[in-house]
Image: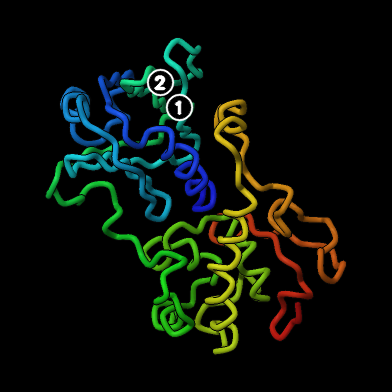
Amino acid sequence: MPELPEVETVRRVIEPQIRGHIIESVTVRRPEVTAYPAAERFCEGLAGQTVCGMERRGKFLAVVLESGAQMVLHLRMTGCLLVAPAGTPEEKHTHIVLRLENGRELRFSDSRRFGRFWLFQKGEADLRSGRAKLGLEPFDPGLTAKYLKDCLGKRRKAVKECLLEQNIVAGIGNIYSDEILFAARIDPARPACGLQDKEWERLAAAIPERLAYFIEKNKISPEEYFLTKGKDYRNTPFLQVYGHAGEPCPVCGELLRRRVIGGRSSVYCPVCQREGGTL
């Protein structure tokens, strides 16, 4: 599933291509993809609207319209947004097409069909998508050691699992939780209630630092994004631990280990991430 850095990359690539343009018409080929309202009203509500820009909240994207309405979407596991000239062959599993007045189209494809769209009119509260339940953004000044400790400091759950809870910090998934905990020198299986003040400080610093780093490494031009059909913009070469089980730790050389925590695969360094370890 795309996590915050990937979703932010999509926003940065797509927004300049659709901002200021009018949505002439909309086609929905899979009605279940439009979670609210029903497909016919969804299409009617977007036709004729002018795009003001795009926003990101956690892993959600929102296309902001001149009327004050918002089209909210979540890519989920395999969702993909692409701007293409009308007439260009569509990707397989293209479920929604927004035709713009400039002859281009905003297309959404999704092989597993888990992605969802919502359309909220001006003044209509978003009580359906889940955005209202999200916790702080990773770059919010309020994301401090005290905030994390107050939210999680009494939890016996593994700190890795806690980082995946979107109502605490929005946008972190399995990949970047591993990278964040490695940078913070914290064993992912440690119960959150066992972390010391210095570890909360390191964790609060590592969350925005690591995500900002990977957003930067994800940079891709609209041309490159189009050539890869929006499916090859991840920063895999820059991951230090995720996906590298059995390889030497980039810091100490010890072999990285993999274990399952809360049903998720986790990779960590048994030396750097032991309690009191140095990095």
Q: Nearer the viewer, residue 227 or 276?
A: 227
Position of 231 with respect to 48 (left or right) is right
Position of 126 with respect to 212 (left or right) is left
Do the residues bearing badges 2 and 1 touch, measured as CB atoms within 8 Å?
yes
Where disc 1 sits, the SS reads: strand
Give the farthest residue toward the left: 123
Indicate whether 168 appears above or below 29: below
**Residue 3: horizontal and vertical position, in percent?**
51, 50
> Residue at label 2?
104
Label 2: how many Cα within 10 Å (few below 14, some 14–19, many 20+): some
What is the three-letter code of the residue carrying label 1?
Val
How far apart are the alpha carbons under marks 2 and 1? 7 Å
What is the three-letter code of the residue carrying label 2?
Arg
**Residue 127: horizontal and vertical position, in percent?**
19, 51
Indicate whether 263 appears above or below 230: below
> Residue at label 1?
83
Taking the spot 45% from the left edge, 10% from the top edge, the residue there is 87
Taking the spot 76% from the left edge, 61% from the top edge, the residue there is 257
Name which of mark 2 and mark 1 comes first in the sequence. 1
Where disc 2 sits, the SS reads: strand
Taking the spot 48% from the left edge, 44% from the top edge, the residue there is 12
